[in-house]
Amino acid sequence: MRQLFSNLNLNGDTPVRVQPRLGEWGPRRVPSTTQKKRARLWVAGAFCGAVTALFLLGNFFYKLLMGIS
């Protein structure tokens, strides 16, 4: 079964010794896989919220112009 999201870990199964500039605790100032997934879900939610808000605003103006209460 395909996963819902792609694997955001670009290093895969490569050993740490062949990954560039990785120290004992990993790279610095690079978002983790969890942070990337969280950001992806937040953006999708914000997009759905914006579309819903625009629909409700259009519905409000439609009813206002048509004289429907």
Image (tube, rainbow, N blue to C red):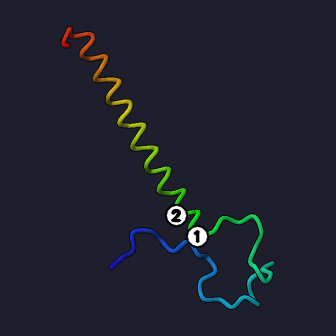
Residue 2: numbered disc: none
Q: Quadrant of the C terminus?
A: top left
Q: Residue furthest left?
A: 68
Q: Residue at x 59, y 83 (%)?
A: 12
Residue at the image point whose x is 74% and y is 77% from the top: 26
User: Can you give x and y, in whole percent of width and height, for residue 49 in the image?
Assistant: 40, 40
Percent coordinates x, y for residue 25 in the rendering: 75, 79
The count of marks equals 2
Q: Position of residue 47 (x, y in %)?
A: 44, 43
Please state which amino acid type lies under the numbered disc 1.
Thr
Residue 15 located left or right of residue 21: left
Q: Is the residue marked by circle 2 packed among few (<14), some (14-19), or many (20+) residues within 10 Å?
A: some
Q: Amino acid at mark 2?
A: Lys
Q: What element does badge 1 sit on? A: helix
Q: Toward the viewer: 38 or 11?
A: 38
* Relative to 30, residue 23 above or below: below
**Res. 37 mark:** 2
**Nearest the eye: 30 or 6:** 30
Q: Where residue 54 sits: x, y (%)?
A: 38, 30
Secondary structure at numbered mark 2: helix
Q: Left or right: 23 with respect to 15?
A: right
Q: Residues at badges 1 and 2 in contact (C-beta under 8 Å)?
A: yes
What residue is drawn where x is 18% and y is 12%? 68
At horizontal 64% and vertical 80% (from top left) the residue drawn is 11
Please rate how many residues cluster around mark 1, counting C-alpha atoms within 10 Å: few if below 14, some from 14 to 19, many from 20: few
| Rendered view: 68 above or below 38 | above
Q: Quadrant of the N terminus?
A: bottom left
Place residue 66 in its image quadrant. Answer: top left
- Whole-Å distance between the Cαs marked 1 and 2? 6 Å
22 is higher (above) or lower (below) than 39: below
Q: Quadrant of residue 19?
A: bottom right
Q: Which residue is mark 1?
A: 33
